[in-house]
Structure formats: C-alpha cells, structure tokens
Amino acid sequence: EADRVTVLPGKLSFTFRVGSLSIPQELNYLSTKDVEALRKLPSLSSVAGVLVENLPVEKGGEVFSLRVVGIEPEKWTELYNLGILRGRTLRRGDRYSALLGYSVAYDLFKEDLGVKERVKIGGKEFTVVGIVEHAGGFMSTEDTTVFIPIEVARELMNVEPDEVSMIVVRVKEREDVEEVADEMERVLLKSRRVNEPDFTIVTPSFIQNVVSNLMGMMSTLLGAVATISLIVGGIGIANTMYMTVMEKTREIGVMKAIGAKGRHILLLFLLESGLMGLAGGVLGVIFGYCLGEGYLFFRRAVVSTSQLNETARAVRSFVHAHMSMTPDLILLGLTFSFFVGVFSGLLPARKASELDPIVALRYE
C-alpha cells in the first residue's frame, strides 16, 4: 500500500553492481521506545510495533509453520486495509483470540476453518474470532498470516519485554511518503542514540528499487544464458552441417555434373541448416511450455504442502497466475531459430557450393 511504511531492524542494502542483498548478521532490535517516538510525528496517522515469528499452527492433526503477527488489537484496522469476511477483528481485552488470513482458513488445511473454532498456535489453544478477506497482490503476505494480540505473542515468542520485530506506520493523506520517511529516520536516530541508521525504513519506492534491481539482474543473467546458448547451438549446427557436407560430397559432385549451380547447392544447404534451427525452436517452445505449466502446478500445489509452506507464502500471490504464449511470440521465436540455423550453416554451405565436381566425384 502506498501510504504504509515499515521499519525493520538492521540496515538492509541492495547493490546492483555486485548483485547482492546485504543483511546484517546481528540485529539491534526495535523497541517500544522507538514506537512512542514515532507516534509523536504529526504526519503519521497510526503507528504500531508488531511481533513477527513463524510458529506451529495445528488443527485436526495437521501442523503448519505459519507467519504469526502479534499486534495491538485496536491498531489492526488502522494499519491493514482489509475487510473481514467472517466474524470480527481483534478487540482490546482479547487474549487467546486469533484472526486468520484467507489462505490459512480455506487453503492450507484439509477442512476449512470457521469462526469460534479452536486452533493451537505455538502450543496454546486459540479461538478463531474472524477471517480476513482475500488480499492478493504482489508481495502481500496477509493471506497466509495469523494475527494475535501482541501481549500473548510476547509470551509465545519469548522476546524482551520492550522488543518489537518491526514498526508499521500509516502516513496521513497528502503527505509525501519519502519526506515522511526522512523525518522518521531523524526521529529514530535520536531515539536510538546512534549516528548511522541501524534500521531500514521500507517505503514503496524502496521496494520498487529492490524489485527493479532484481529484475535487472535477472534480465542480465537470462541474456547471458541466452547468448551462450545461441553460440553453443550455432556451433553445433555448423559442425553438423560440415559433417553433412563431407558425407554428401559425392552427391554434390553428381548434382554439379548434371547442371546444378553453386548457388543451388548453397541454398539447399542453407535451407537444411535453417530447418535444423527451426526444429530446435519447436522443441524449445514445447519444452518452455511444459516447464512453465509444471512450475505453475508446483506453485499451486505448494500452498497445501506443510513442508513447503514458507515457499507458499513467498509465491502465494501468484497461485492463480497463468502462462500466456501468444501466436506472435511463438512465430517470432521460430523465425529467430530458423535464421540462427541459416547463419550457422552459412560457411558449410559456402564450402559445399565451391566444391570442384571432379574432385567431389572422386571423393571416397
């Protein structure tokens, strides 16, 4: 969400040139003191410290390690722009009450979970008081999250009395998020009594920058792989065509003896090498389609697999994705493959077209 900003412990940095995400080994945790300092900023409409940890969630003999978020009950509605599908939100005074994400209630367990049902979280029994509407969206984790009161979470997660995993804030309307983030940094530096940030303020532009850098790295990597593949494939086609010329030397001599011109031989071998490249392109399209469908099938299946539920949370926003292979893209790929084959067979074809028919007929 454009107006929601998160503060994480430790200084995260992404460097495109070295292609690495720098994560500190030791994190100085955020505290309730930092939360109170941020609450004094007039540009923020809501501020809350939350606790986040993966805890076992059990129901009917099934156990999943899920993302559990401890939050002040009255802050949930202010910070998460999500509706309630069933039941209600967390309320002040709730203890062992849980608010379930959509996928937790309806996708993970064999039987759907409903309001007033009992589930075990971290070995303690909780009553489901509500189910959140389906969130969806890129990098959203609410669907696979369980929300509980922060005081109970503090007991389950065994953390320091004033510790919070992260601070979530919502910026007031008409405020510039980046300017507010700079203001938050100054406040936190003063609150934590440090000269350099030992925390990371995650704004929409920060996420966009990280994603853009990752996409740039992926594009560069895929481009390098594609280039190497083309070179190797082209060399393979050229070697095959050289062998073909050697094997058909006598046939070339016969064709020239009965009147075939050098250009006819050249075109014949170029067509053969082009068709070889085209065949490789067809196989590549089929393989790519099968690989894509297999990957999507894996991503759908992973949502209901307990051993892989961490991956499920990372990709669950793409569960309903589909692969699109348009005719124009397929045609472009096949055309490119054909011309790669033609280019690779150019030298062998030229050699074949320049053979002396007398020498070719004597070739054994």
Image: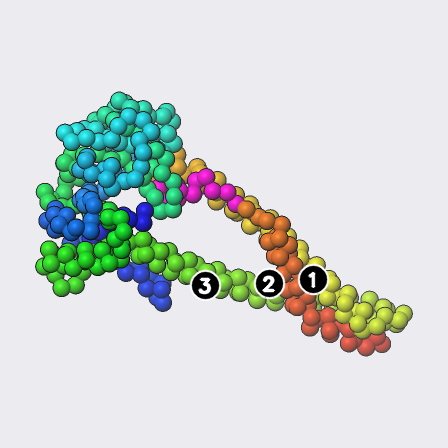
Q: Where is residue 303 in the image (x, y as percent from the top left)?
A: 39, 37
Q: Where is residue 164 in the image (x, y as percent from the top left)?
A: 16, 45
Q: Position of residue 45 (x, y in %)?
A: 20, 45
Q: In this view, does 101 lie to the left or right of 74?
A: right
Circle number at residue 220: 3
Local packing at callout 2 (Cα closer than 10 Å; few below 14, some 14-19, many 20+) is: some
Query: What residue lies at 66% left-to-right and 68% top-to-bottom?
Result: 343
Q: Can residue 200 be seen in this view?
A: no
Mark 2: secondary structure: helix
Mark 3: secondary structure: helix
Query: What residue lies at 20% left-to-right and 38% top-to-bottom?
Result: 75
Residue placed under numbered mark 2 in the picture: 233
Query: What residue lies at 62% left-to-right and 57% top-to-bottom?
Result: 332
Whichever of labels 3 and 1 marks the residue nearer the N terminus, that label is 3
Callout 1 amino acid:
Gly
Distance from the alpha carbon under mark 3 to that under mark 1: 28 Å
Distance from the alpha carbon under mark 2 to that under mark 3: 20 Å
Q: Please, which colouring scheme is shown?
A: rainbow
Callout 3 amino acid:
Thr
Q: Position of residue 85 (x, y in %)?
A: 33, 29
Whichever of labels 2 and 1 marks the residue nearer the N terminus, that label is 2
Q: Is residue 156 magenta?
A: no
Callout 2 amino acid:
Gly
Q: Nearer the viewer, mark 2 or mark 3?
A: 3
Quadrant assignment, res 176: bottom left
Q: Nearer the viewer, residue 123 or 180?
A: 180
Whichever of labels 2 and 3 marks the residue nearer the N terminus, that label is 3
Q: Which contiguous range is marked in magenta?
A: 310-323
For the residues labelled 2 and 3, say whether their Cβ atoms are less than 8 Å apart: no
Q: Nearer the viewer, residue 272 or 6?
A: 6
Residue placed under numbered mark 1 in the picture: 274
Predominant SS along the magenta part: helix
